[in-house]
Image (spheres, grey):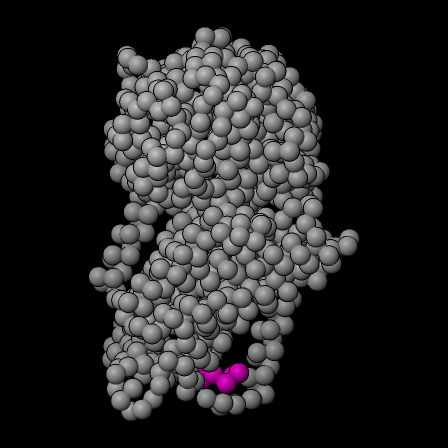
């Protein structure tokens, strides 16, 4: 074991190898002279689309990818231009971004922070992506946002609804178009009070992670302000697929409303369980028992089928809106893919266009210039009415939709109806609101 | 050299050369050529090669030598990451205290888990470790301990990150990204030779040096009396106990050593990318290291490194082949054939990379039970036979 065979030749050999090893990293001094990370030098510019292609949110991810491909087509002047025709800013000309043809690379977030960061890194380091867009989970969005801040590229968040994304985890290089838990609460509460009265007792089932917590907090605060009472809040593991054991105690709690702070497969299962237990046919405290799903999506409604009938929730955007922007987008999306776009597809499409437009207006791809162009940007024609990208936290402020499951759906895409379009003023909040406190944007990082 | 015999020395030299020249080997295709897609020489992937190499080497010390199949090794990786990020949050971005703490913490946790799990062997041991790992995953995911104490310990699903308002008492004016006494991990040199472009990242070379050290240590363990004892446990534990030997201290030591390797890997992951998430501890991650080790060759010295590299390459490169790329590649075919090929290939690329991994794993298990190492040996012995026509020694596994 302790066989020592120190020969002159052996020592020389190992010394030479070790020396070469130590010297290797230092002999190359050619350093890149780019002004910022991945400065595009050729005739093309590469965008990175990082979406879940496997895992629980794969459906949402694939729809995001469709929208992103469509956005690239429109930016390059192919197709009918979609929302570029209705967008209030006319900086985009359909010749790519700043005259460079737009190309894209894709990655799979697997709805895991680690995998998402790995694929984002590979897009930045290997493919030279100048912007990362997409995602379908707040945990992933926050993780990738932090990465983009460090790497010096812009992050245009996809579907992320947690208050923390533009609250305590906000970053100078990150921008969110999607709405958040607070806005859902603020938009839902008046409608709930109108439909179900102001003396309700609510029981919350909440997905046990950042998004669930912040949404529960927001909805509870907003409904309590209307006079509701929160009976209980039970945290459920994200991996749960059977919620029967969580539903039974609801019956004996004296609550007459069940709030499901669940998303994706969780929501489909918990709602189905609740309906199977006959909750919606019950009369409690002399009132009809009701179920509320604060964050809705078409794909979830599709999964839950008839169970969503009459259930109220909120959405960022829906294809049934009748403004010009929505019509143009739904038309070109439908023509290409034969189905209406989901809310997550819309937000990714809009984010891609907003990024391209900001580059055009800034005249550069430099993240600091782009961020400056996006901060405080007022725009319209993107399906949500007049919208503001607030400079303080990089959150978009716009109208919020309150939706209700349709009683008699005409087809499988026609499951939800718009109950109310809550005006922007009603969902606005101060940047230092307690639910969003503790964060710090920091300074924009151009990398390099 | 260095207390190794000739064969082991050449193996060590092979690993040294492989790790030092990885940036060149992995970027072998010119930057603008059609094959550039297959280049893996970018910092993040190379770092992952080295880090998961360390993880698999450590796992192999337990599984390859004692035969105890731990199905919960990712727990130590995760613990290591959390420990490292906490050091970044409390002290500063220097990775040295972070790495030390991550190894120590992972070691302590593995003493506890090993102590309990090693009361059983075989499938019961595997299930116990799996149960512990899943428990720790759930605790980290919901930040159970943090909530009991009223603080943020793991930050749940979002993952532990460093914020501008963290204490970082030693930070001062130091760098604001992970560094080793000022040498930033994110720094890199880019070398352009004609159409080629090679990237030499500092972070990767740190990982590579630690990989080489880990590999050297693992050779020494394999060749030591202690290693022999572990192999004896693997071949017949009953006989060992009948000869009056208590095997538990040996298995526990192997368990803790491999746990510390995992902790080092976890700490390095955090050092390259200062974030720790609970899914790093999920059972699929524990399964991944088992697959890496078996794919490369259980019980061989270099197998785990090869296995880790193969899996990580597939995960990062094959998963990025999307349909647009496939259409580009098959565009030389007639249209109907092109669509057929793209349809077929899309099963195995992009989100279907798990399928490719599964098929490869099956092929290796069926035809090369000794893993890629056995494949290499078969190939080598065939060449040797062709040259010499005789004296082809029957290749024995490298242990």
Image quadrant in which the C terminus of chain B is located: bottom left
In percent of width and height, residue A398 lies at: 57, 18
State how many labels appear.
Answer: 0
Image x and y of residue B67, in percent: 31, 73
Q: Is residue A219 visible?
A: no
Q: Nearer the viewer, residue A118 or A258?
A: A258
Q: Quadrant of residue A79?
A: top left
Residue at the far front in the pictured view: A285
Q: What is the magenta range?
A: B1-8
Residue A191 among magenta residues? no
Can residue B62 be seen from the camera position used here?
yes
Q: Position of residue B128 (x, y in %)?
A: 34, 64
Q: Residue at x 29, y 86 (%)?
A: B241
Residue A185 versus residue B376 in the image, above or below: above
Give the camera-side residue of A199 and B105. A199
Query: Magenta stretch: residue B5 in it?
Result: yes
A153 with respect to A67 (left or right): right
* Residue A100 location, quadrant: top right
Q: Residue furthest left?
A: B366
Residue B377 coordinates in the image, percent (x, y):
31, 71
| Left or right of residue B123: residue B223 | right
Please identify the dominant SS of the magenta region: loop
Q: Nearer the viewer, residue B209 or A306?
A: A306
Residue that appears at 28% across and 35% down: B343
């Amino acid at each position: 074991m302790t066989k020592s065979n120190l020969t002159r030749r052996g020592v020389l050999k190992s010394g030479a190898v070790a020396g070469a090893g130590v010297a290797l990293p230092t002999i190359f001094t050619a350093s890149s002279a780019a002004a910022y990370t991945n400065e595009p030098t050729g005739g093309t510019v590469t965008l990175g689309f990082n979406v879940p292609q496997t895992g629980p949110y794969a459906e949402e991810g694939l729809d995001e990818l469709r929208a992103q491909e469509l956005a690239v087509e429109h930016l390059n002047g192919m197709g009918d231009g979609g929302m570029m025709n209705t967008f209030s800013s006319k900086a985009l000309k359909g010749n790519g971004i700043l005259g460079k043809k737009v190309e894209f690379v894709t990655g799979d977030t697997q709805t895991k922070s680690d995998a998402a960061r790995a694929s984002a890194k590979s897009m930045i380091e290997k493919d030279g992506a100048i912007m990362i867009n997409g995602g379908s989970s707040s945990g992933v969005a926050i993780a990738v946002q932090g990465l983009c801040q460090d790497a010096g590229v812009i992050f245009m968040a996809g579907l992320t609804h947690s208050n923390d994304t533009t609250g305590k985890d906000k970053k100078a290089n990150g921008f969110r178009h999607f709405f958040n838990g607070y806005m859902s609460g603020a938009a839902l509460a008046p409608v709930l009070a109108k439909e179900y009265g102001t003396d309700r007792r609510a029981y919350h089932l909440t997905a046990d992670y950042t998004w669930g917590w912040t949404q529960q907090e927001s909805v509870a605060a907003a409904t309590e302000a209307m006079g509701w009472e929160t009976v209980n809040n039970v945290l459920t593991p994200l991996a749960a697929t059977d919620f029967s054991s969580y539903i039974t105690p609801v019956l004996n709690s004296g609550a007459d409303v069940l709030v499901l702070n669940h998303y994706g497969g969780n929501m489909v299962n918990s709602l189905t369980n609740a309906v199977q237990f006959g909750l919606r046919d019950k009369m409690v405290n002399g009132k009809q028992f009701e179920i509320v799903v604060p964050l809705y999506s078409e794909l979830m409604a599709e999964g839950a089928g008839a169970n969503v009938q009459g259930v109220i929730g909120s959405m960022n955007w829906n294809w049934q809106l009748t403004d010009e922007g929505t019509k143009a987008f739904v038309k070109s999306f439908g023509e290409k893919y034969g189905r209406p776009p989901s809310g997550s597809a819309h937000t990714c499409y809009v984010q891609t266009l907003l990024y391209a437009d900001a580059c055009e207006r800034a005249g550069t791809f430099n993240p600091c210039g782009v961020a400056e162009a996006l901060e405080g940007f007022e725009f319209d024609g993107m399906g949500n009415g007049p919208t503001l990208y607030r400079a303080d936290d990089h959150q978009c402020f716009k109208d919020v939709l309150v939706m209700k499951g349709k009683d008699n759906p005409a087809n499988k895409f026609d499951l939800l109806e718009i109950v109310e379009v809550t005006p922007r003023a009603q969902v606005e909040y101060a940047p230092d609101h307690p639910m969003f406190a503790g964060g710090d944007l920091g300074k924009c990082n151009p990398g390099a | 050299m260095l207390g190794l015999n000739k064969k082991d020395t050449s193996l060590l030299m092979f690993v040294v050369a492989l790790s030092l020249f990885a940036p060149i080997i992995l970027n072998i295709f010119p930057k603008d050529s059609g094959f550039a897609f297959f280049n893996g020489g970018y910092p993040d992937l190379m770092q992952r090669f080295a880090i998961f190499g360390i993880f698999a080497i450590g796992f192999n010390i337990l599984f390859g030598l004692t035969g105890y199949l731990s199905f919960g090794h990712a727990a130590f990786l995760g613990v290591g990451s959390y420990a490292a990020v906490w050091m970044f949050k409390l002290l500063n971005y220097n990775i040295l205290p972070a790495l030390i703490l991550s190894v120590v913490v992972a070691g302590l946790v593995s003493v506890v888990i090993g102590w309990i799990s090693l009361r059983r062997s075989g499938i019961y041991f595997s299930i116990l470790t799996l149960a512990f790992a899943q428990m720790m995953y759930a605790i980290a995911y919901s930040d159970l301990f943090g909530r009991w104490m009223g603080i943020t310990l793991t930050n749940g699903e979002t993952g532990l990150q460093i914020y501008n308002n963290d204490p970082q008492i030693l930070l001062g004016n130091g760098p604001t990204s992970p560094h080793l006494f000022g040498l930033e991990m994110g720094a890199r040199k880019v070398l352009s030779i004609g159409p080629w472009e090679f990237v030499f990242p500092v972070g990767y070379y740190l990982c590579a040096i630690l990989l080489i050290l880990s590999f050297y240590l693992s050779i020494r363990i394999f060749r030591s009396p202690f290693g022999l004892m572990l192999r004896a446990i693997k071949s017949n534990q009953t006989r060992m106990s009948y000869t009056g030997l208590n095997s538990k201290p040996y298995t526990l030591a192997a368990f803790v050593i491999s746990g510390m390797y995992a902790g080092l890997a976890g700490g390095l992951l955090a050092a390259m990318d200062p974030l720790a998430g609970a899914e790093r501890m999920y059972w699929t991650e524990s399964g991944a290291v088992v697959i890496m080790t078996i794919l490369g060759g259980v019980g061989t010295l270099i197998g785990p490194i090869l296995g880790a590299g193969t899996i990580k390459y597939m995960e990062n490169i094959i998963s990025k082949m999307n349909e647009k790329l496939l259409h580009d590649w098959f565009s030389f075919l007639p249209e109907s054939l092109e669509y057929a090929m793209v349809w077929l290939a899309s099963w195995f690329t992009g989100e279907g990379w798990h399928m490719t991994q599964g098929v490869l794993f099956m092929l290796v298990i069926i035809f090369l039970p000794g893993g890629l190492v056995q494949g290499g040996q078969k190939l080598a012995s065939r060449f040797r036979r062709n040259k010499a026509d005789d004296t082809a020694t029957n290749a024995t596994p490298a242990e």
